[in-house]
Amino acid sequence: MNNIKNVFSIKDLENLSGIKAHTIRIWEKRYNVLKPMRTDTNIRLYDLPSLQKLLNITLLHDYGYKISKIATYSEDKIPSLVREIISSKTAKSHAISDFKMAMMNFDQELFFTTYNWLIAEKSFKEIFHQVFIPLMNELGLLWQSDTITPAHEHFISYLIKQKLLVNTEKLQVLKQTKNDKVFVLSLPMNEIHELGLMYLHYEILLNGYKSIYLGESMPIENLKDLKRHYDAIVFVSYLTVQPERDSIDTYINEMTSQLVDENTELWFTGRQVEFIQKENLSDKISIFTSISELVSLL
């Protein structure tokens, strides 16, 4: 596990806030909004309070406040103003910023406070689509750019999974209302990224279907067992990093040969589906480029 990160470069701030490094430098020089630390070689470094302040300034700036005006405010007034102007229009960006800060500080209390504030106004489905999906997409980019560590990603992912499990359990106790097919959800071998599949499990239950969640690293031969219990099955898989690009078509072909018949379908989504050769696929196979696209078909 990498060392925990609590000091950031100006590039890190750009990645986390969306404000270009060049603009941050101008804001510092012209308006003194941030006071970076300096290395012996005069390289800017920033602490967590600086990151929090920049995220708040970004929201105010997006809301129409001029940076020259923001620069005149006291340290206490900026977060106070942010709280005052939060509306449905700005709730999404503010919540994402708060969840980022919760992640960077490993702050469970801030995560739960932000979530409880959201759930008082929105459904869990709205929170997931409007906040958690954009957040997780950003985290993937932040991880790739070395702005966050695996520790940060695991921390926030686990808390989101907790919320998914709680909300999924509420649906599992309800009687299913649609009986024409059963959904079976699993991930291929060595695929451990469950969050997307877990949300699809929630959505399928929300739509009244029976959903059987099998989770990560499920051999194809074990999926065949389900066909002895159910007549019409849709096997759903979320491909984030596995199978790798050069073996994904082999995997799809194996799934097809072992599982597909007139009563069985295969649904695939996730980052890796862009590498699937879609020519000559069985009409029993559906490829979705997003969670929303798949959910719209339920």
Image: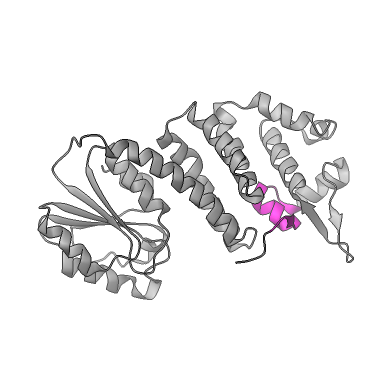
Quarter of the image for residue 267 reads: bottom left
Which scheme is used to colour this image of the protein? one colour
Q: Which quadrant of the rendered structure holds the N terminus?
A: bottom right
249, above or below 223, in the image? below
- Total labels: the figure holds 0
Q: Quadrant of the C terminus?
A: top left
Viewer-nearest residue: 40 or 224:
224
Percent of width and height locating residue 52: 71, 43
- Which residue is at a point 39% across and 44% down the rendered structure image? 165
Q: Residue 292: name its quadrant.
A: top left
Residue located 38% across and 46% down the image: 199
Front position in the image: 90 or 218: 218
Per the image, is 1 magenta? Answer: no
User: Picture coordinates of residue 200 (x, y %)?
Assistant: 34, 47
Left/right placement of residue 173 relative to residue 284 reads right
Read off the magenta span: 5-21
| Extreme residue in the top direction | 84
- Give the residue at x 61% y 49%: 103
12 part of magenta stretch: yes
Q: Is residue 126 left or right of residue 202?
A: right
Relative to 92, is 5 above or below?
Answer: below
